């Protein structure tokens, strides 16, 4: 089965074609960073308008590159949520309409299910069941995965998502947008001995997270400092270390509580090198397997939506002719 996917849930316009026999044929991403940079964060209305301008040319490029006709497709998957409503509607309207015009099954895919299944695009894939840590700009979720569609929520962030905490802390340190990768780069120059930040909610049982206090801790530390470039790097180091340690502690706890031997990490923050290193160490220590997507598929992309959509279409699922978009949509509502 050959599936075209469209992803427009936030600030990346992305398209991909996945073939269940040949694998990923191609994918393309157009990033809106330059537009939102001016405002220090994603402006939903501008995101939607830009998706509207870029999506059709990107689709045409994809078909031109692959030299395949649209009628060689067997199905269409588009991100139906969660995300920015106006942005989602662009991909949903184009995906659903193209599916209708070609007379092929079409399906709205859950963005976080896409992230969760992104490691399946690699040569070495995890086998079910496993524990997944999903860490993006909008979500921090620990999920017990029995199989596709069977997701038990073990823990989540009670306030800011991990990526959101990176972005907000980067912004208050004047690192611009997008902040997560910039903060991680700056942390490389930080002195580990300068500051120790708290590891929130690790001193009590449970698998929930809370990251918003760390941002305030960073701000107070900065305001009470000499405010040099080195101090900025030291704060970035301490902040990153606290977030990553906290994620790793909770992963370890989730593995032990569920007696699992396999961990999957996905979502934008899974691109973080310190997180990848620390989880590789954990995997050695506990004798468990850890799977990440390649860095390119950690952040938003359509390859993951194509893979997730293809699995569901192969299982015989498809939507009716309505255009599906949900700003809020829990992963546990899936079946
Ligand atoms: O999955 P994603 O592309 O979009 C959402 O679904 O939210 O995740 C984007 C998030 C942003 O908050 C970004 O700052 C964060 O992932 N991120 C990182 C890194 N690369 C991206 N955070 C920390 N370190 C990184 N290297
Ligand atoms: Zn995402």
Image (spheres, helix red, strand yellow):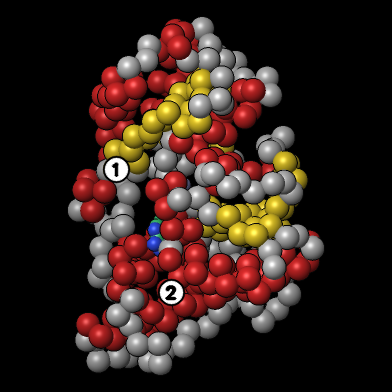
Q: Which mark is residue 258?
A: none
Residue 210 appears anywhere in the view: no
Drawn side of residue 56 relative to residue 269, left or right: left
* Frontmost residue, 123 versus 29: 123
* Frontmost residue, 132 versus 329: 132
Residue at the (69%, 68%) spot, across then down: 287
Residue wearing tag 1 = 31
**Quadrant placement of the C terminus:** top right
- Is residue 63 placed above or below 148 in the rendered structure? above
Q: Tell me the element at label 2.
A: helix
Residue at the (28%, 19%) spot, across then down: 64
Q: Residues within 10 Å of mark 1 (few under 14, many from 20)?
A: some
Whole-percent x, y for residue 82 in the image: 52, 41
- Is residue 31 placed above or below 139 in the rendered structure? above
Residue at the (20%, 53%) spot, across then down: 38
Drawn side of residue 14 relative to residue 118, left or right: left
* Frontmost residue, 139 versus 116: 116
The answer to whether the residue bearing label 2 lies less than 8 angstroms from the nearest atom of ligand 1 is yes
Residue 100 appears anywhere in the view: yes
Q: Quadrant of residue 259?
A: bottom right
Q: Residues within 10 Å of mark 2 (few under 14, many from 20)?
A: many
* Among numbered discs 1 and 2, the one appearing first in the sequence: 1
Mark 1 and mark 2 residues within 8 Å of each other at the beta carbon: no
Whole-percent x, y for residue 191 in the image: 35, 87
Residue wearing tag 2 = 240
Whole-percent x, y for residue 285 in the image: 66, 74
Gap between marks 1 and 2, in whole Å? 25 Å
Whole-percent x, y for residue 219 in the image: 36, 79
Residue at the (29%, 38%) spot, across then down: 30
């Amino acid at each position: 089965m050959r599936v075209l996917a469209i992803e427009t849930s936030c600030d990346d316009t992305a398209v991909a074609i996945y073939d269940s026999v040949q694998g990923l044929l191609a994918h393309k991403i157009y990033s809106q960073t330059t537009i939102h940079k001016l405002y220090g964060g994603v402006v939903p209305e501008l995101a939607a308008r830009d998706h509207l301008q870029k999506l059709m040319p990107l689709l045409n490029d994809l078909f031109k590159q692959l030299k395949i006709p649209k009628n060689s497709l067997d199905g269409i998957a588009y991100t139906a949520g969660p995300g920015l409503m106006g942005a989602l509607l662009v991909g949903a309207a184009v995906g659903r309409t193209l599916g209708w015009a070609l007379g092929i099954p079409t399906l709205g895919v859950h963005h976080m299910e896409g992230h969760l299944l992104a490691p399946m695009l690699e040569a070495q894939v995890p086998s079910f069941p496993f524990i997944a840590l999903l860490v993006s700009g909008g979500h921090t979720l620990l999920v017990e995965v029995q199989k596709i569609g069977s997701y038990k929520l073990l823990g989540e962030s009670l306030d800011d998502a991990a990526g959101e905490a990176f972005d907000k802390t980067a912004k208050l340190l004047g690192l611009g947008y997008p902040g997560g990768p910039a903060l991680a780069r700056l942390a490389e120059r930080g002195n580990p001995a300068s500051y120790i930040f708290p590891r929130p909610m690790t001193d009590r049982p449970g698998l929930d997270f809370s990251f918003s206090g760390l941002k305030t801790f960073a701000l107070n530390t900065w305001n009470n400092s000499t405010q040099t470039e080195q101090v900025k790097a030291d704060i970035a180091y301490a902040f990153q270390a606290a977030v990553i340690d906290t994620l790793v502690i909770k992963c370890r706890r989730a593995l032990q509580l569920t007696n699992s031997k396999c961990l999957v990490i996905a979502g934008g923050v899974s691109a973080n090198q310190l997180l990848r290193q620390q989880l590789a160490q954990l995997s050695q220590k506990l004798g468990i397997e850890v799977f990440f997507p390649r860095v390119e598929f950690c952040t938003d992309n359509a390859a993951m939506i194509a893979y997730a959509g293809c699995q569901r279409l192969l299982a015989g699922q498809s939507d009716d002719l309505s255009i599906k978009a949900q700003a809020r949509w829990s992963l546990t509502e899936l079946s």
